[in-house]
Amino acid sequence: MEEKKSAEKKNSMEEKHSMDDKNSKEKNSMEEKNSMAEKSSMDEENSMDEENSIYERNSNLLLTPVPKEDCTFKKEYPFPIVTPECKPNESDPDWKIHEGYLEGDYVLVHEERSIKMLYTMGFYGIGTLTGGAPRICSQESTESGKQMTSSAASQVDDVIDVVSSGDEGSKSKTSKEEEEDDDVLIAEDSPDIGKVYPKLPDFEEKESLQLSFEEAFFLSYALGCLMVKERNQPLPIACLWRKFIDRTEAANFPSMYTAYHHFRSKGWIVRSGAKYGVDYILYKDGPPFYHATYAVVVQILREDSRPFRNSRQLTWASLTAINRVISAEGMGFIILNVYKPDSMIGFIPRTPACIPDLKVEEILFKECVIGEDTAKKDALESLAHCSRK
């Protein structure tokens, strides 16, 4: 009996020791987990603090868009528009599909309503006669300004003195002579000098909206509100893509369109920068409301950052020259690198399915004067604020 009790006592002691060991192991594992969690949380906090400090330092390099004063242009909502009346899986009955015609190196839109909508709701294209805002848009934008000054103009008209017809040198024409001046044209150099010919009516050329290939493809492919035709035949997206590539120098349309799509997707109004020797100009809301904020130069590179032979070569001299020009206009300078994968080198993509394969990198070019300000020494470490996608 005594041996049995001693054996039971020994077993109970061993069980107790095993339980204690198990509890100690669990306690140690819990402490290790807690320490690991605390360490990871501290690392996350440190990384977030570091990211915030980098963001705050780089945010000082970004420019604030400058609004224009006394703007009379009516602000419209840009494309695309989603209204409460739009039902799921149904098209908007108010959504208009505009028609454009491929002619040469541009796409032309002729309908006045389409011209007004495309320009005022996103500032796409330029007028073929004005080179800027189409006349139909600029005329309507000045109507409000004319209404504001109509009362003042009427007061001025009330105080204008009419010169009497009896004064010397102020003989007024008779109504018959005025009618003759309006209705007839006398050919003085003609041998029949005595004959009277009817006056030709004034001819006014119709203005169209001129879209670049990037603008036209964005409206067709990204927004789906433009149907491009050639010889009155609609062009599918893939066919339109190929035609734009064939008509673009060095077949750079995929890279240039990717850059255009990139900035449009960020909410910028993208316009041509040929005036300043760059590829694109970026506006907030549109040229009538804000001054240009950034000028963009697109550089097409390989995956290993080597430029292509026929692409633009950016040197420090050219970068400095461009920066001087656009700095005088109060704009910042962005270099957008478009990286082509090795799989795309040697052949031209025939569909827009290649767009996700192109990677873009923004570099904010900032000129820094050493010693002018001690705070700028930190900016020397990040002359280029990169956001790699």
Image (spheres, helix red, strand yellow):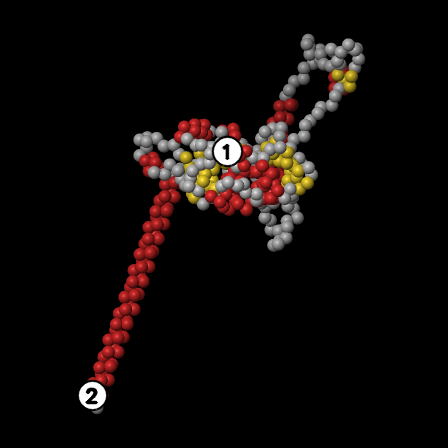
The residue under label 2 is: 3
Circles 1 and 2: CB atoms closer than 8 Å: no
Q: Is residue 271 left or right of residue 87?
A: left
For this rendering, which residue is in front, 187 or 381?
A: 381
* Label 1 – label 2 distance at C-alpha: 98 Å
Residue pushed farthest top?
A: 168
Q: In the rendered structure, find residue 279 and report the number of the disc placed on it.
A: 1
Q: Position of residue 370 (x, y in %)?
A: 32, 31
Seen in the picture, residue 343 relative to 171 is either above or below; the reply is below
- In percent of the image, x 28 and y 69: which residue is there? 25
Residue at the (50%, 40%) spot, across then down: 346
Q: Quadrant of the N terminus?
A: bottom left
| Residue 8 at x, y percent in the picture | 24, 84
Quarter that holds the C terminus: top left
Q: Residue 110: horizontal and vertical position, in percent?
A: 66, 35
Q: Secondary structure at mark 2?
A: helix
Residue extending farthest to the bottom is 1
- Please tell me how crowded label 1 is: few (under 14), some (14-19), or many (20+) other residues with Cα within 10 Å: many
| Residue closer to the observer: 345 or 367 | 345
